[in-house]
Amino acid sequence: MKLTTAGESHGKTLVGIIEGLPSNLPIDIDFVNNCLALRQSGYGRGGRQKIESDKIEILSGVRNRLTLGSPLAFQIVNRDYANWQPYMAPEGADVSQKRLTKVRPGHADLTGVIKYDQTDARNILERASARETAVRVAAGAIAMCYLRELGVQISGYVKCVCGVEDKAFYPFERLSEAKEQPLFMLDGELQKKAMQLIDELRVAGDTAGGIVEIRVKGLKSGFGSCMQYTTKLDSILCGALMSVQAIKGVEVGMGFGVAYKPGSLVHDEIYLKDGAYVRTTNNAGGIEGGMSNGGEIVLRAAMKPIPTLMKGLNTVDISTGQPAKAASERSDVAAICACEIVAECVTATALAEVVSARLGGDNLREVKERYSRLP
Ligand code: EPS
């Protein structure tokens, strides 16, 4: 399975192509659209989400809600394009307008302008924008349709918003409650505090990041490999999370905590109970030697604060070489809820790639038979 994405933030449309899905996989379009709506939700979003109402439009590869085994192409139309067509249209546009030269620290603007030999950071930010994650959510929701046929579930929640951190560990079954909360947090008091903080940051023209925790339940052992570095499951899943705009740190299980404890308090000891290997801890986060070990996979990703600040950070105007305040028209104060659902979805896509690489299978029946035969 393989995903390719295309599309600019204020261009006509966002596009995805998924290759390698087996035939006869039911595609739950309402579920995909629900994931897209979750990506647009959450406390702290800005004005753009009032314009967009993201919906998947499947263009090929599906007939009567079942995959055909052919490439699945889809689009998510940018409603804002109606306002941007004069400045963005491929067939001719007024590029003297909507220029961005007061490049934003923390964004792709400056490095992109230099690398792609541009004088307008618009030509960089349009693609670097986190709007691209809409495609990755739709594709990830489709990957979840595939994984759930095998009994594999993915869920998550927001663990921290700009330092307001929930240190509890919740059972998998409770995680779905988070989606009903304004900040996808599970501790009501901490959530209230985080919302207050977002309000204060909005007034101050500032932004917030946070931490999301993603968990995978029901995956059998042996996915990934210890035989070649490129096929290690932890590196693949962490790479997928790091590919999300604004993610600056990722950890598995105890993560950075392993550096603070002796081995006897880190490694999950093994027992044999009623003929099955069991552990009483899961500090490894479900991955040992680059392979799933049958335990719950536990991943955490840290999102930096959004680099577009209404108050503007110090920068240089690349058209004049003069000091300036960085550009801002509108901005999310926090997009941590979006980040949470995006992180679930990119985990699903990466995992579906690993699973389908091991199982192969042209049709869903074959895939399910092969999975059921695994220990
Ligand atoms: C986004 C749409 C964008 C931004 C955000 C993500 O809308 P606009 O640029 O029109 O305000 O809100 O983009 C970024 C965070 C970024 O870094 O560019 C979306 O749909 O998620």
Image: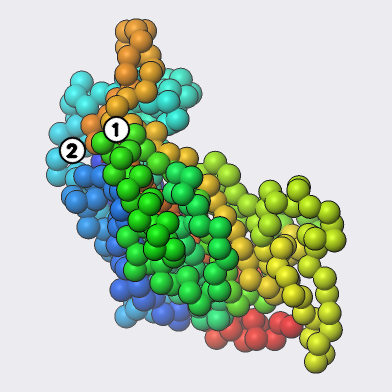
| Figure check: 6 above or below 155 | above
Residue 143: percent from left, percent from top: 48, 68
Amino acid type indicated by mark 1: Gly
Q: Which element is circle 1 on? A: loop
Mark 1 within 8 Å of ligand 1, using the beta carbon: no
Q: Which residue is mark 1?
A: 205
Amino acid type indicated by mark 2: Trp
Q: Residue at x 19, y 24 (%)?
A: 97
Q: Is residue 237 left or right of residue 244?
A: right
Asked where in the image residue 295 lies, by quadrant, the reply is bottom right
Residue 30: percent from left, percent from top: 30, 73
| Numbered label attached to residue 231 | none
In which quadrant is the C terminus drawn? bottom right
Q: Residue at x 76, y 47 (%)?
A: 259
Residue 190: percent from left, percent from top: 42, 56
Q: Which residue is mark 2?
A: 84
Residue positioned most to the front: 189
Nearer the observer, 184 or 143:
184
Asked where in the image residue 236 lies, by quadrant, the reply is bottom right
Nearer the observer, 155 or 292:
155
Asked where in the image residue 71 lies, by quadrant, the reply is bottom left
| Number of the front mark, 2 or 1 | 1
Q: CA distance from mark 2 to mark 1?
A: 25 Å
The answer to whether residue 344 of the structure is visible from this angle is: yes
Q: Residue at x 19, y 32 (%)?
A: 87
Q: Is residue 215 left or right of residue 288?
A: left
Give the mark, 2 or 1, whose residue is nearer the N terminus: 2
| Figure check: 324 above or below 159 | above
Q: Which element is circle 2 on? A: helix
Q: Residue at x 43, y 72 (%)?
A: 176
Quadrant of the displayed image that contains ligand 1: top left
Circle count = 2
